[in-house]
Amino acid sequence: MNLPNKVKIVEVGPRDGLQNEKEAVSAAVKIELVDRLARAGFRNVEAASFVSPKWVPQMATSAEVLAGIARLPGTIYSALTPNMQGFEAALASRADEVVIFGSASEAFSQRNINCSIAESIARFEPVARAAKDHGLRLRGSVSCSFGCPYQGEVPLSAVADVVGRMRDLGCDEIDIADTIGVSTPRKTQAVMETAARAFDLARIAGHFHDTYGQALANIYASMEVGVAIFHSSVSGLGGCPYAKGATGNVATEDVLYMLHGLGIETGVDLDQVVDAGDFISRQLGRKGASRAGNALLAKRTA
């Protein structure tokens, strides 16, 4: 199977990565992190989330972050928008892309946002329309596409259904997310092939968590079936507050090390990402979770 020559990495550390941190991270630190990542070459940085500060206090400074970053031409700065109130805030803050999210698991949808999958997607209709009216990119994220902490197995038909609903809302890109990190390569390929029957494969992204150490293998397996967009988080930041035991997203440094070793073009400078990972890890007062990042840092000081 042929691997893609080029892969787009969506850096989600500043939003998906930092949202679960217990200690407050200042807007200034987040701005510095976003700017470092953009300078490293990422063309898409998930920088903000306009959700209720009551539920996600770490994202309360999102407007301040988007106001303070040094925007690079050609870089998409994304914001999560759960409703019209969030959309209006994202629009006022000049987000380039808004992100809506649903689940392929009925049980997860009920436990996470207290409504059915169909109801959750219907809530996004006005957000999707508004995004199109204002010329913003619209991204859809499908959580628990490979397994659910509450119901276990998620049928392929459920993934196809939600992808189809997201497509019908006008999404420009759709993320297929392994929220609890349970997938393995063959299963990953089956899910991605199913999603591709409902949406353009070139606009499907893989979002893998590394709970069972399978994220890199799942990315490789996804590339074998033609997926060429992936999400990752600098220094392996993040997790899912609604999925017990779920560890962080796959570390960006590890993904880049693998892709560059395969001769796949990313447009991203790994050394600068290592620096960004070291910066945020020091701010959080702990060692980074990226194996490649830690190895490269150790090599520098050897």
Image (tube, rainbow, N blue to C red):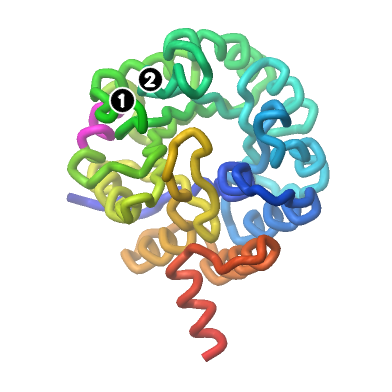
Is 217 on the left or on the right of 207, as rendered?
Answer: left
Q: Nearer the viewer, residue 161 or 60?
A: 60
For the question of whether residue 96 can be seen, the reply is no
Q: Which residue is mark 1?
A: 151
- 276 w.r.t. 200: above or below: below
Q: Amino acid at mark 1?
A: Gln
Q: Are marks 2 and 1 in contact (CB under 8 Å)?
A: yes
- 143 w.r.t. 113: above or below: below
Disc on the earlier residue, 2 or 1: 2
For the question of whether residue 160 can be seen, the reply is yes
- 278 w.r.t. 178: above or below: below
Q: Nearer the viewer, residue 258 or 290?
A: 290
Q: Position of residue 88 (x, y in %)?
A: 74, 20
What is the magenta range?
190-196
Name the residue: 66% across, 30% down.
55
Q: Nearer the viewer, residue 116 or 86?
A: 116
Q: Position of residue 16 (x, y in %)?
A: 57, 42
Question: What is the residue that sits farthest to the bottom in this orientation?
Answer: 302
* Magenta-span inclusion, residue 194: yes
Q: Which residue is mark 2?
A: 107
Name the residue: 46% across, 46% down.
231
Q: Amino acid at mark 2?
A: Ala
Q: Position of residue 227 (x, y in %)?
A: 33, 42
Tell me the CA gap for discs 2 and 1. Answer: 6 Å
**Exactly how many numbered labels are in the figure?**
2
